[in-house]
Amino acid sequence: MELKRKDNSKPGKGWWQGAGIYCLALCVRLFYLVSYLNSPLSGHYRTDHQFYRDWGLDLSQETADATAAFTQGPLYAYFLGFWYWLFDSPEALILTLQACVGSGTCLLIYASARRLFSQRVALIAGILTAGFGPLVFYDVMLMKTFLSPFFTALILYACLRFREQQHLLWLWLAGISIGLAVLVRENHILLMFPVLLFLWQSSDADRVMKKVRYQSVLVLICACAVVLIPVAIRNTLVTGEFIAVTTGGGEVFYMAQGPDANGYYSPPPFIRTHPLFEHEDFRLEARQRTGQPTLSPAACSRYWFWQGMKYAAANPLRTLKLTITKLQILLNDYEVPDSAYFQTTREFIAPLAYLPTFGLFSGLGCLGLIVSFPRRKQLLLPIGLLLAHIISILLIYNFGRFRAGLLPLWLLFAAVGIDWLWAAWSRPVVVRWPRLAAVPFVILTTLLCMLPQSGRIQAGYPEDEAAFYQFLQSRQRILQQVNRLKKQVGSDDTGQAIQLASALMQLERFHEARDLLLPLAEKYPDNLQIQRFLGSILTQTREWQAAIKHLEQAHKLDPDDAEICNNLGSAYEKAAETSQQENTVDLFETAAQFWQKALRLDPRNSFARYNLARNKIRLEQHSEALADLNQLLEEHPEFELAEQGLEPLVMSPDSNLTAEEFQAAARSLEQLARFYEQTGRKPFQKHALQLAEIARRRSGMQN
């Protein structure tokens, strides 16, 4: 194969092949989706996935925090929020849409390869991306990852079309795509640089006037800015300082370059590894180290960025070694997990087990890049986009989903390598064998990339995957029970229906459980078990008014059940938070009344006491709230949620606790720290002790 843009195929043939690539990709993804929905993984969301799902639900109900800057890329959350606002449905429809978008990535790579190489390379690249295991995995996942390869492919295609037609609309599309990619992950801003170089080079090669060249660059930058400026304005308005997209970049950089960095996700010992806690823990530590308790989130992020820079500069050999380690991890077959485990998923979803993984194309991708080197000027854009993704990972750390954006580009060059080797057979023997000498290189590189990395054992991934595998096995047994009960349950069999609904709740399939019990609740309004159970399910689907209706009915049937009273109080509280009416105060008061009744019925009801304490904090009754939280920890020393009530009392500058009350709060936090120590959770222990230290310091200030 000669690496030049030469395509003698008929246009109609290319169109049909493109349609075939899209249909193949969609069929693979839909087959995977059907298998996923019938697997124990369906309905279960962990850490980042749960974080984005909850964020989207909050946006749809207008309960999201509008007073703080974004800590993670907001694009996917707003997409979910709009979707949940339009449709009251489980995630199957969203994942179907994502499968369509992911199939579009394959089509874009096919169309780009036709313009860069040949019809045969395009066909190979399209087939590879259509059936590539990690891409299918990330496309059909309730997470933002699928957007990264899609926008990368769209940027590549739009720029190539601009080179063909010189129409500025294609540049607008490329710039907007870069901006949207930045709203997925901030380091996608690096994609701007190869595009700028491409425009500069293309204009010079085509002898376009300098004015047109500058116009192209300006249009690209303006298109990207159109997307990013509204986000920056929003952040600036709510925080009072300039924040382009998020406030977490410096913290991520410190984890990647600081003393605990190992190439994988390796948080410092003071960090609780959950999206709800990570950034707050970094900020608390920064404020303690600088002695500035009012240090803003953006200033904290800058502090950690410079701490990471200083550590990297002070240890250049370690930084170089760490970068090489990251590159080895990047090129390895292993999909480094964060909250989703590719290797474990392959054991529960059959189609994924038969799809190829990254290591199989690592050698071919390297070969494709090598044989493309003579045309590096013409291939500046795809090579530059690939390098931008690689650099963005080398600057931070490795997750499998972080390299998802480069996968279509890598498969494009793998297709070039395959075609280059395939073309050897059509050449004379004298010319054929030098080319086939590259086969050992491909095999050796592939084998090296398939070898397990020792660092992943030290990072604890095998233990995490083993625990997740056992968890999925338990869900598999529940799923089998659900399938059995579905065959047995009758239209009037309330006992079997409740048993089935309970099993569905354990699988977190709340919408299915709701749809099962709703007709029975209308038919049997005096069935306490159905009304109570349905009310609890409706709180999980965030249908607060409907939950109140059925929990009220359950309360009438059994007015002395403390758990029903507590759940009713929580439903009224959520209804108040989402209400746009003037009766919000009444709803909060009703919630407090039910929590108080729950405590009268059961004085040791931990959740009712905790909910009352939170309500008192909202009403700025800080002393009464602290008394409730202290009593709660005396009765239930292991009740961890109490810390989330104590933290605002200790940290808020508006807290009106006395010196003695701050001391009491410190003792409660130290008690929690001892519990965390006993259970082996050092980051939680450190956080509780930090709060206790702040409480004691504020106690001294009160004196």
Image (spheres, rainbow, N blue to C red):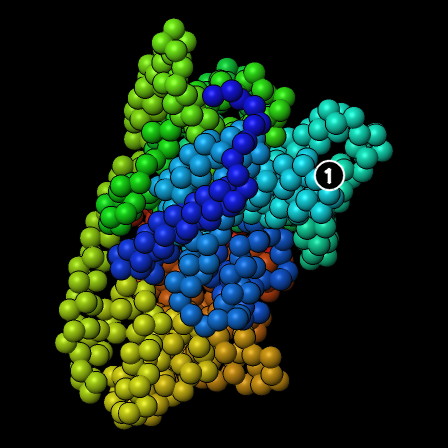
Instruction: Say left or right for 73 vs 465.
Output: right
The residue located at (44%, 39%) in the rendering is 126
Looking at the image, is 283 positioned above or below residue 607?
above
Residue 245 drawn at (x, y percent) = 64, 47
Residue at image point 40% right, 87% down: 549
The answer to whether 608 is drawn above or below residue 141 in the figure is below
197 or 448: which is nearer to us? 197
Asked if 647 appears above or below 83 in the picture, the reply is: above
Q: Residues within 10 Å of mark 1 (few under 14, many from 20)?
A: some
Vertical order, 260 against 539 (above or below):
above
The residue to which callout 1 is attached is 166
Q: In which quarter of the image is the C terminus?
A: bottom right
Residue 605 visible in image: no
Q: Position of residue 528 (x, y in %)?
A: 26, 87
Which residue is painted at 38% across and 76% down in the image? 538
- SS at mark 1? loop
Q: Where is residue 2 in the image (x, y as percent from the top left)?
A: 51, 20
| Residue 31 shows up from this direction | yes
**Which of the two residues, 296 or 447, is positioned nearer the viewer here?**
447
Camera-side residue of 577 and 78: 78
Q: How many labels does the image show?
A: 1
Residue 439, how many percent across, how many down?
A: 34, 16
Amino acid bearing label 1 = Gln
As drawn, is 254 to the left or to the right of 172? left
Q: Which residue is drawn at 53% across and 22% down?
A: 3
